[in-house]
Amino acid sequence: MNPRRWQWLTAALVFAVLVVISCSLLLQGHRASAAMRSHSAKVVAAASDSRLAGAYRFKKGGWTYVHLQGTPDQIGYQHGYLLAPEIRDAFAAVKLEDTHNTHHNWQFFRDAAQNMLWPHVDAEYQSELKGIVAGLHAHGVMNMDLDDVVALNAFMELPDYYAPWYDKHHKVANAPKREVQGHCSAFVATGSWTKDGQIVIAHNNWTAYLEGERWRVIFDIVPEHGYRMIGDGFPGVIVSDDDFTINSDGLMVTETTISDFHGWNPNGIPEFDRARKAMQYAGSIDDYVKIMLDGNNGGYANDWLIGDRKTGEIAQFELGLKAYKVWRTKNGYFVGSNFTSDPTVTKLDTTYNNDDPSMSPNARHMRWDELMKENKGKIDVQLAEKFEGDHYDAYTKKEGADGRTLCGHSDASAGGDKGWGVAAFDPMGAVQGKVTDSNMAAHMELIARAGHPCGENFYAKPFLAAHPQYDWQAPVLRDMIAGPWTEFQENQHAAR
């Protein structure tokens, strides 16, 4: 063949191939653009959905404030739609932590959600959970379904309570030894112990920083039935889950976890269901206790600290699975830092050791009693803020943040905590704080601080460089920047 003719044919062939590729890429681009336009149109259409009527969100002081109202389906849809990016992000963190810590894959949690939890969830909250899924999908979060959302709602129950129970009863080989670690430092006081004789209540949430940095939502919820609620919460979860909430009938509720707890009732009602129901429908301490006891599954076992603004009475409700006890007073205080108070609960439901002063719950218990006695008659919300950021180690008798201080910094503890099974330099501790009193609660108000209540920041990159044993958290661990103490109230808007 003539060389020139061959060159011409080769060039023509190359040109034809380039034309085909260009057309293919152009077509793909048009399709992608059309898909993006379609998705955007769907999101815009979803935003005009009548179920979003009256709902809104804004950011303030490091928190995302979300107002939800209406029927269960509407509240769920609003929750899922308005917090879709936060829920997707929080889900990734929970999924990583739960699977890593339990050695179970995520399907294990999905199965538990579908087959064990869902049949025992109240119809009202089933509707709300379905609404969250619908809202997520409307906002383009398609990688989560109902089983995922239910498992997310039980992220304080399934890994630390159900999974160890399952491993034991099914004799799972090489199952990790799991101790229920404590979450939170809290108090409630009334009568001669407070500055004005009314109730003061405060709480800081202890948890892994990878979750805690995401625990930054203030929910203002106006349900179709029951009382209005305002409190902090975790994206995608229908209850506060660190349980600092006020309802419009005067109840102020918080809690601290019972350490070294064991036990699970697979036929019980999920804790997230009972705690939400109690907050929404309880008008008294008695009501709260009754609702929490009904169908108790043993999940997320806590000492509940409760105040009733109408009567000035406060209570400590220690809820195990086999035992429980309630203490009440109109002149006194109750504190919580993950220790147990009732000998029967301690014996039947835990392996907790109240006699070791080096353990974080016991050291913080001592510090709480010191602060209460030193400040009797002076306690108000300003002092409560200082208490929640306290860095005095009652065991070493030294000032300095660590895993035994009320404002916990376990990432600064070289020795960890043998009682909890907390490893050295574990990135966990106090991740935010909240306070309120009777006068504020009457107006559905609270004060909250995102990040360490002391105001210190946590930086993920230098921490991981210094402690590579926690590299598994790298995909989701990020900086936890402390915000200011910030006031929130019902019906609040960004300008306020």
Image: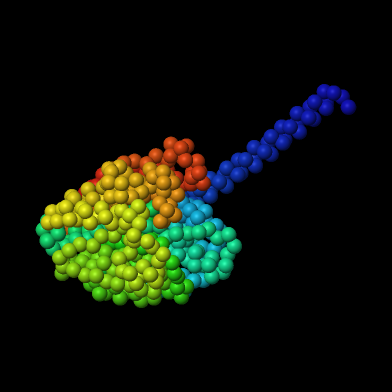
Q: In this view, does 303 lie to the left or right of 249?
A: right
Q: Is residue 19 above or below residue 134?
A: above
Residue drawn at (29%, 60%) of the image: 336
Q: Is residue 479 above or below residue 434?
A: above
- The percent coordinates of residue 265 (x first, y second) are 45, 73
Which residue, as the protein is rendered here, is positioned at the far front? 355
Asked which colour scheme the image uses, the reply is: rainbow
Which residue, as the protein is rendered here, is positioned at the far top? 4
User: Is the N terminus in the top left, top right, bottom left or bottom right quadrant?
Assistant: top right
**Closer-to-camera residue (291/464):** 464
Kindly tell me whether residue 302 is visible in this rendering.
yes
**Closer-to-camera residue (402/90):** 402
Q: In this view, does 1 lie above or below 337?
A: above
Q: Is residue 12 above or below residue 45?
A: above
**Closer-to-camera residue (139/425):** 425
Q: In this view, does 382 lie to the left or right of 135?
A: left
Q: In this view, does 355 lie to the left or right of 142?
A: left
- The percent coordinates of residue 349 (x first, y second) are 40, 69
Kindly tell me whether residue 88 is visible in this rendering.
no
Image quadrant where residue 73 sits: bottom left
Residue drawn at (43%, 36%) of the image: 462
- The percent coordinates of residue 394 (x first, y second) are 28, 50
Image quadrant where residue 377 sits: bottom left
Residue drawn at (26%, 74%) of the image: 287
**Closer-to-camera residue (339/450):** 339
For the image, the number of numbered tags is 0
Residue drawn at (41%, 43%) of the image: 414
Which residue, as the protein is rendered here, is positioned at the far right? 1
- The percent coordinates of residue 415 (x first, y second) are 41, 46
